[in-house]
Image (cartoon, helix red, strand yellow):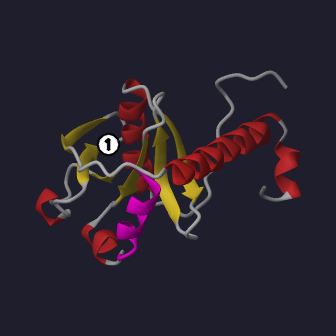
Amino acid sequence: MPLNSELVLPRDGRQSDMALSVARGTRRLLRARKFATVTELALASGRRADIVALAEDATIIIVEIKSSIADFRADAKWPDYRFHCDRLYFAIPPDMPQEIMPEDAGLIVADGFGAEILREPPEHRLAAATRRSMMLRFAHAAAHRLHGLADPEILSFGSL
């Protein structure tokens, strides 16, 4: 089967339509800023990051998507993401109140077409060993997913 624009990653069912829309716009913004991205990346802590972005200089950012006030209030795990990135952002839809988002994280407003960074986060550079570990997780996840698009049966072999 030739690679073409008809190949699409299947939805995993964990995200709402709103969260998927925010992720799409956010990933477009990150791509325009020369970041490669993967979604739903498992971290060493056992958590799963909504979006992990990798720059050419090995800077790693994590974007936590919050699609509603209830989604934000139900989540106390986001501070853990700081141990896995150089910068942490929240991405929210345009109609969500910005003032409830933590001041010590970046803020992105996004819809299905694009996004805008409203606030840059503080930088906290990763240790070299953590950066290497994150880059390997990123590479393995991206390669595994790409292989799955070209050969869907490989996904039945289980995760790496």
Q: Which residue is mark 1?
A: 111
Judging depth in this view, the residue of 121 and 71 nearest the camera is 121
**Dominant secondary-structure state across the stretch colored magenta:** helix
Does the magenta portion include 2?
Answer: no
Assign the N terminus to one quadrant of the image.
top right
| Residue 4: x %, y % from top left | 70, 22
Where residue 137 appears, as percent x and y from the top left, is 63, 50
**Quarter occupied by residue 151:** top right
Left or right, 100 with respect to 114, comes to left
User: Taking 123 as reference, is 55 left or right?
Assistant: right
Query: Could you tell me residue 23's position as x and y percent?
Result: 42, 46
Horizontal placement of 122 versus 17: left or right? left
Highlighted magenta segment, given as a residue range: 76-86
Tell me the amino acid under the disc marked 1: Asp
Q: How many marks?
A: 1
Quarter of the picture holding the C terminus: bottom right
* Residue positioned most to the front: 128
Q: Residue at x 88, y 47 (%)?
A: 153
Residue placed furthest toward the left:
99
- Vertical position of residue 63 compared to residue 77: above or below: above
| Residue depicted at 70% across the width and 45% down the height | 140
Along the viewing direction, whichever of 63 and 114 lies nearer the viewer? 63
Q: Is residue 81 magenta?
A: yes
**Whole-percent x and y of residue 158?**
83, 59
Specify few, some or many for label 1: CA neighbours under 10 Å numbering under 14, 14-19, or 20 or more. Answer: many
Please state if 31 lies on the left or on the right of 89 as rendered: right
